């Protein structure tokens, strides 16, 4: 999959993640038919600086960990953005991950 074109597809999915919900890099990759490309989705989230409407903070790893948090300005911005939407985060881990998980395969 081409980099820029793939990133655009990732962003089209990510902007649909509802407020107060989270998904995983792998779930987006799987939805796009690129099941082994979770890392590429992570790179896309890292490159959202030019796409401020993409809620990159709502994309976490498959266990609900905020693995991308070091890409946000400020040490706790990713967690603060999630918490402002009512998501509880303890030790970089989304609590009630299963109930908050948004699966694009089921939702789109």
Image (tube, rainbow, N blue to C red):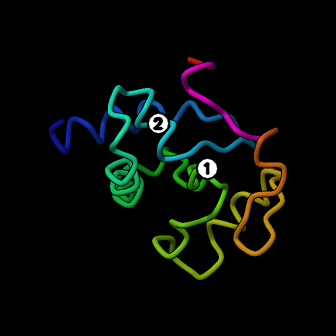
> Residue 32, which numbered label?
none
Question: Dividing the image into 4 quarters, which one contains the C terminus?
Answer: top right
Callout 1 environment at 10 Å: few (<14), some (14 to 19), or many (20+)? many
Real-space Cα separation, disc 2 to disc 1, in angstroms: 12 Å
Q: Which residue is mark 1?
A: 58
Q: Is residue 48 left or right of residue 66?
A: left
Question: What residue is drawn where x is 78% and y is 51%?
Answer: 85
Question: What residue is drawn where x is 39% and y is 54%?
Answer: 48
Q: Which residues are magenta?
A: 100-106
- Name the residue furthest left: 2
- Say what secondary structure mark 2 lies in: helix
Callout 2 environment at 10 Å: few (<14), some (14 to 19), or many (20+)? many
* Whole-percent x, y for residue 25 in the image: 48, 47
Question: Dividing the image into 4 quarters, which one contains the N terminus?
Answer: top left
* Whole-percent x, y for residue 68 in the image: 51, 66
Total label count? 2
Q: Which residue is mark 2?
A: 28
């Amino acid at each position: 999959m081409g980099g820029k074109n793939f990133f655009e597809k990732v962003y089209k999915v990510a902007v649909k993640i509802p407020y107060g919900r989270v998904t995983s890099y792998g779930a987006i990759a799987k939805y796009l038919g690129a099941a082994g490309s979770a890392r590429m989705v992570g790179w896309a989230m890292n490159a959202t600086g030019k796409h401020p409407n993409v809620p990159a903070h709502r994309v976490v790893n498959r266990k609900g960990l905020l693995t991308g948090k070091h890409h946000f300005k400020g040490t706790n911005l990713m967690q603060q953005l999630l918490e402002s939407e009512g998501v509880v985060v303890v030790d970089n881990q989304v609590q009630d991950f299963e109930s908050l998980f948004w699966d694009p395969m089921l939702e789109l």
